Amino acid sequence: MTKIDATTIIHQHNAKEFITDYWTKRAPKFKELRREELRSEKMKQWQDEICRYLPTQKPLKILDIGCGAGFFSILLTEKGHEVTGIDLTESMVQEAILLAKEEQSPARFFVMDAESLAFTDETFDIVVSRNVTWNLPHPEQAYAEWLRVLKRDGLLLNYDAEYGKYHHEDYEKEAVFAHKDVTKELVEQCHRIYHMLDISAYDRPRWDIDVLLKLGARSCTADTTVGQRLYQKKDKFYAPAPFFGVFAKK
């Protein structure tokens, strides 16, 4: 069988279809990994990380974008907030519903495009996401939508990494990391996603800050020490690429 390069894939498939196919294949094992993460020290670390930015009043209306199997949604409902998770991949949403039921979380989940949200303006107090923007074909459009659904004085918390720039590093020498149990075929599909998207070449998080300010955010900062604090231990949740947080106030 002839090997197909990323350019051919873009011609043969819509980029979102290709990306959704990747996450559909990963969904069942992804839920298992998130279940383990919820029952590890990472849950409290992430609760502390996110909640230090949040206003003290409860419950806040929070939108978890690209929720995957529901990790952020579940840990934030445990803190008393009203959380809605959305993901483009239907099978991920199904896994999130199952995991939330296991964890007795009231989080709600819907299939929805992060670049075209079905919510009215100023619906949420907080928008959160993790590992989403790196695999969006139109990230600036997504950011515009995320700001649109935030209430005045609302806060956007986006955690991501420059995966596209670092995926050629020799991670096989690591004992464990997030892709360790992913098949070679899926790793290759992930690498093709990096190559097909412009965001892989951006200077992040500088690009994110510039875009969010251009779109009307009143303030925007970044924290490039998030990965050093949350991923010190090279466990099964570890991701070697530089991890950062972007925080914008509407």
Image: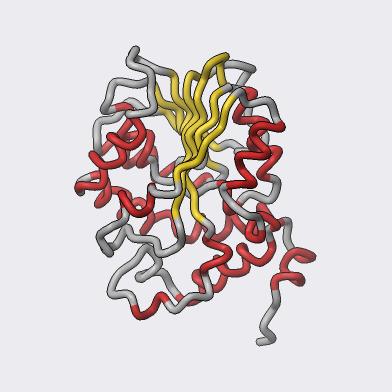
Q: Which residue is situated farthest in the bottom direction here? A: 1
Question: Quadrant of the image for the C terminus?
Answer: top right
- Image position, residue 175 (x, y; %): 28, 75
Instruction: Look at 70% across and 71% down and name the residue there.
Output: 6
When asked about the image quadrant of residue 189, the answer is bottom right
Which residue is nearer to you in this view: 237 or 20?
237
Q: Is residue 170 left or right of residue 22?
A: left
Please say if 177 is above or below 110: below
- Image position, residue 228 (x, y; %): 34, 54
Please say if 232 is above or below 222: below
Q: Is residue 57 left or right of residue 215?
A: left
- Image position, residue 196 (x, y; %): 69, 63
Q: Is residue 110 left or right of residue 148?
A: left
Instruction: Look at 60% across and 30% down and name the residue there.
Output: 146
Instruction: Look at 32% across and 34% down and name the residue there.
Output: 74
Number of numbered callouts drawn: 0
When asked about the image quadrant of residue 84, the answer is top left
Instruction: Look at 49% across and 49% down and name the residue there.
Output: 160
Question: Quadrant of the image for the N terminus?
Answer: bottom right
Please say if 222 is above or below 120: below
Is any part of residue 130 visible from this angle?
no
Q: How is the image coloured?
A: secondary structure
When asked about the image quadrant of residue 212, the answer is top right
Is any part of residue 61 visible from this angle?
yes
- Image position, residue 100 (x, y; %): 32, 36
